[in-house]
Image (tube, rainbow, N blue to C red):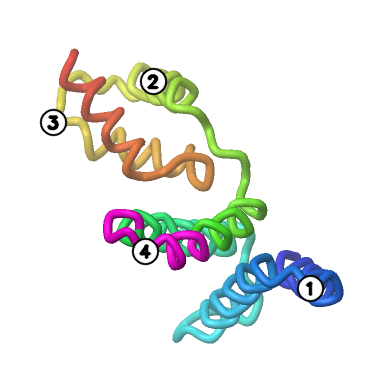
Amino acid sequence: MLEQEINTEIKAAMLAKQEARLRGLRAIKAALLLAKTEKGASDILTEDAEIKVLQKLAKQRRESAEIYQTQNRDDLYTIEVEELEVIEGFLPKQLSQQEVEAEIKAIIESSGAASIKDMGKVMGLANKQLAGRADGKMISEIVKQLLSQS
């Protein structure tokens, strides 16, 4: 279970005095605790729920890092990037754009989608199949591009 692994990693990071890693691990632990205490949530998170929490954290760090970079705040940018690296270490391997494109082409063929009008159907299938392995924004752009060509 991810929570136990995080606790073990926190102890190791504390002993090794790895401040950046410790920050990232504590952020993950806090987000997992928050997800478990949300209204309607069960006491035990599924693997899918854990991945969604990690993806949300990673997305927040990426967006913050971009903002800090455009504002020339290298000190804050560095913190966000360090935490992002820790978070990404617990996420499944992300697919490349070519791999995502190949999977979406297969989804389009199997679903019989013919035009941009079928985007909702293709997006539903693609998000389900590629959950945790590809960014939703990338999936959306590729689906739109492939359906507008047909």
Residue type for callout 4: Arg
Q: How far is mark 3 from mark 4, CA to CA? A: 43 Å
State the residue in front, 62 or 139: 62
Rendered image: mark on residue 73 = 4
Mark 4 vs mark 1: in front = 4
Q: Secondary structure at mark 1?
A: loop
Q: How far is mark 1 from mark 3, CA to CA? A: 54 Å
Q: How far is mark 2 from mark 3, CA to CA? A: 16 Å
Q: How far is mark 2 from mark 4, CA to CA? A: 47 Å
The residue where tag 3 is placed is: 117
Mark nearer the N terminus (3 vs 4) = 4
Q: Main secondary structure of the magenta part?
A: helix
Mark 2 vs mark 4: in front = 4
Please state the extent of the stretch shown in magenta in the rendering. 69-80
The residue where tag 2 is placed is: 110
Q: Secondary structure at mark 4?
A: loop
Q: How far is mark 4 from mark 1, CA to CA? A: 25 Å
Residue type for callout 1: Lys
Classify the position of the N terminus by image quarter.
bottom right
Q: Residues within 10 Å of mark 3 (few under 14, many from 20)?
A: few
